[in-house]
Image: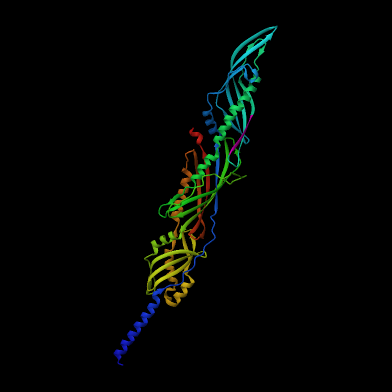
């Protein structure tokens, strides 16, 4: 065999060897890691709503409704033939005040009296009819409480009176019984004026009506980020109330709403609203501040699509060899994320990388810590493409496998703050508050999504100003 033929044979042998080796590396199909997930339960939050109801506002509204003739008796024969006709008007504004945990009120009344006078003296019968006017202030006290079924119980009792203008009739042998008249007015008006004020108090303190709007409106999903299509959903579970605690000028109480909050990525969630308030639970105390845990949900499909924006088409090198990422899929396994990457280049096929999702507070992103090939992928790579088994490759990939949350949290904070400062409902209920902080607290991997628990805290107040517009 001459030198020329030997060279040709050596070239053919080398070429075949290279092709055989190359072919053995061109198809990379390691076993796919099985999915496994956390036993996740959404953490509930309690939103505390301090409520102040101004006595002056109730007083103003009450006086606007209580006008004109309030009581009338135009018969001499009724009330045991008392020979008395009476008309009663409100003289001045009703004055309300808090007396312990009760509502005390004074009602100034203008009186018109028509009295039939019959006098028998010395065998002579005299009869006359006289008209007089006067003014009296009647005082009442109402106790009120809210029952677990949201009904309001009131109990009104008379608390005395004071003559402002004492009526008198001057007839020899006759004196107008003003004490009897005052007692009669008190008894009659306890039923009329007292029941009217009780009804008004029940209507004005009808927290079920006001909170039903809050309860229903808070269940409407709210878009908090356009770019990532992030929606905030709140599912209320329980509502609590502290007993009335009155100050000098207002009725004070606290409402606590226990709810599960979640932020999801993608289309607007379809929520079946629970419009019915649950039974009210009375609590001795609810803190002034509020704390909300929001589970931000990033579906694996959405996470994969977001990752494709940055990593698909990227080429990663090791020495003279390189691979280009063509597709990405993501799921969870044992508290870690599995990244399935389809690659082409010096080797074709699939590789599986695993990393622990952690929140990077400095950059406000969820990134993968200790990104590495999974065990089965490592075994295949060591046999067929040892050059790929290189930390340099995974280090190059890490910056592309992140989920930015800074804008999401910022937008979420802005939206929540806006809701706290500008929410006003049709029935006069409005919210004012301040959001102090919003931080990532924990990350869970569920069958459908990455759950990022966002904790927030601040202060919140519910204002009831429906009466101001009456």
Q: Is residue 364 visible?
A: no
Please identify the dominant SS of the magenta region: strand
Q: Is residue 116 magenta?
A: no
Relative to residue 22, is residue 362 drawn left or right? right
Where does the magenta region start and end? Answer: 151-157
The image quarter containing residue 158 is top right
Relative to residue 9, is residue 415 drawn left or right? right
Relative to residue 354, is residue 160 drawn left or right? right
| Quadrant assignment for the N terminus | bottom left
The image quarter containing residue 327 is bottom left
Number of marks: 0
Residue lying farthest bottom? 1
The answer to whether 269 is drawn above or below residue 139 in the figure is: below
Foreground of the two, 205 or 192: 192
Residue 231: image location, x then y, percent = 45, 52
Residue 293: image location, x then y, percent = 52, 53
Q: Is residue 153 magenta?
A: yes
Relative to residue 349, is residue 174 drawn left or right? right
Residue 218: image location, x then y, percent = 49, 46
The answer to whether 447 is drawn above or below residue 394 in the figure is: above
Q: Is residue 69 visible?
A: yes
Residue 46: image location, x then y, percent = 55, 49
Task: Indicate the colouring scheme.
Answer: rainbow
Foreground of the two, 286 or 113: 113
């Amino acid at each position: 065999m001459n030198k020329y033929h030997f060279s040709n044979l050596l070239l053919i042998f080398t070429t075949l060897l290279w092709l055989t080796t190359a072919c053995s590396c061109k198809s990379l199909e390691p076993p796919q890691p099985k999915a496994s997930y956390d036993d996740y339960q959404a953490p509930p939050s309690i939103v505390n709503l301090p409520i102040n109801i101004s006595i002056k506002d109730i007083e103003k509204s009450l006086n606007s409704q209580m006008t004109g003739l309030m009581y009338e008796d135009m018969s001499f024969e009724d009330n045991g033939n008392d020979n008395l006709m009476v008309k009663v008007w409100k003289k001045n504004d009703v004055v309300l005040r808090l007396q312990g945990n009760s509502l005390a009120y004074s009602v100034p009344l203008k009186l018109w009296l028509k009295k039939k006078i019959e006098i028998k003296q010395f065998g002579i019968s005299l009869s006359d009819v006289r008209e007089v006017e006067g003014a009296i202030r009647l005082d009442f006290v109402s106790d009120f409480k809210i029952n677990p079924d949201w009904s309001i119980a009131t109990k009104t009792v008379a608390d005395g009176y004071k003559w402002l203008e004492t009526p008198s009739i001057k007839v020899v042998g006759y004196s107008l019984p003003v004490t009897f008249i005052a007692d009669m007015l008190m008894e009659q008006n306890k039923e009329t004026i007292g029941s009217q004020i009780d009804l008004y108090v029940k209507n004005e303190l009808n927290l079920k009506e006001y909170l039903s709007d809050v309860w229903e409106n808070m269940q409407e999903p709210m878009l908090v980020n356009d770019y990532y299509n992030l929606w905030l959903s709140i599912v209320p579970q329980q509502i609590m109330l502290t007993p009335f605690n009155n100050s000098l000028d207002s009725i004070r109480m606290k409402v606590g709403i226990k709810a599960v909050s979640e932020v999801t990525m993608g289309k607007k969630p379809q929520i079946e609203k629970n419009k019915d308030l649950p039974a009210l639970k009375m609590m001795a105390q609810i803190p002034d501040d509020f704390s909300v845990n929001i589970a931000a949900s990033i579906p694996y499909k959405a996470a994969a699509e977001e990752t494709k924006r940055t990593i698909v088409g990227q080429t990663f090198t090791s020495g003279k060899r390189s691979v280009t990422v063509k597709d990405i899929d993501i799921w969870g396994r044992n508290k870690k994320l599995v990244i399935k990457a389809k690659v082409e280049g010096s080797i074709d096929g699939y590789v599986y990388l695993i990393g622990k999702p952690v929140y990077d507070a400095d950059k406000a992103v969820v990134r993968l810590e200790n990104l590495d090939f999974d065990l089965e992928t490592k075994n295949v790579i060591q046999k067929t493409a040892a050059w790929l088994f290189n930390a340099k490759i995974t280090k190059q990939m890490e910056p592309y496998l992140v989920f930015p949350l800074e804008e999401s949290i910022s937008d979420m904070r802005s939206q929540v703050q806006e809701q706290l400062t500008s929410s006003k409902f049709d029935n006069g209920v409005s919210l004012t508050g301040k959001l102090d902080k919003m931080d990532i607290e924990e990350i869970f991997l569920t069958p459908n999504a990455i759950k990022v628990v966002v904790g927030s805290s601040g202060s919140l107040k519910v204002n009831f100003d429906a009466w101001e517009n009456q």
